[in-house]
Image: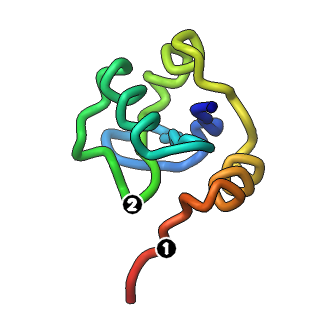
Amino acid sequence: MTVLIDPPNWPGPRGLMWSHLVSDSSLSELHDFALRLGVPERAFDRDHYDVPETVHARAVSLGAQAVGSRELLQRLVAAGLRRRKRR
């Protein structure tokens, strides 16, 4: 069971760069980790949390594994947790 975080490569609100926080085992694990990290529920989007660059180092210090964006997506899909947007 692992929580993963990719580099803050995505431009977002407040002029910050943003990362994705996911679990490769369960959404329950992801929600528990986000709660410990202090990430608000509103940051959850289908299968991941969007977190600002200011949270990245703390996430890693709490045990999130830093991986590239491609690996993060591959592991999310392999875990069967990927939820695409509905049209």
Q: Is residue 85 left or right of residue 1?
A: left
Q: How many marks?
A: 2
Q: Is residue 69 left or right of residue 46?
A: right
Mark 2 burial class by Cα count in 10 Å: few <14, some 14-19, many 20+? few
Work out whether 33 lies above or below 49: above
Image location of residue 13, percent across then percent down = 33, 46
The residue to which callout 1 is attached is: 84
Quarter that holds the C terminus:
bottom left
Q: Earlier in the sequence, mark 1 or mark 2?
A: 2
Q: CA distance from mark 1 to mark 2?
A: 8 Å
User: Residue at coordinates 30% horizontally, 22% vertically from top-left?
Assistant: 38
Q: Is residue 83 left or right of residue 44?
A: right
User: Residue at coordinates 49% horizontally, 49% vertically from top-left?
Assistant: 11
Nearer the observer, 2 or 57: 2
Question: Are the two marked residues, 1 and 2, in contact with CB atoms closer than 8 angstroms?
Answer: yes
What is the secondary structure assignment of the residue under circle 1? loop
The residue to which callout 2 is attached is: 46
Q: Quadrant of residue 5?
A: top right
Image location of residue 4, percent across then percent down = 61, 35
Nearer the observer, 62 or 69: 62
Residue type, mark 1 in image: Arg
Nearer the observer, 32 or 74: 32
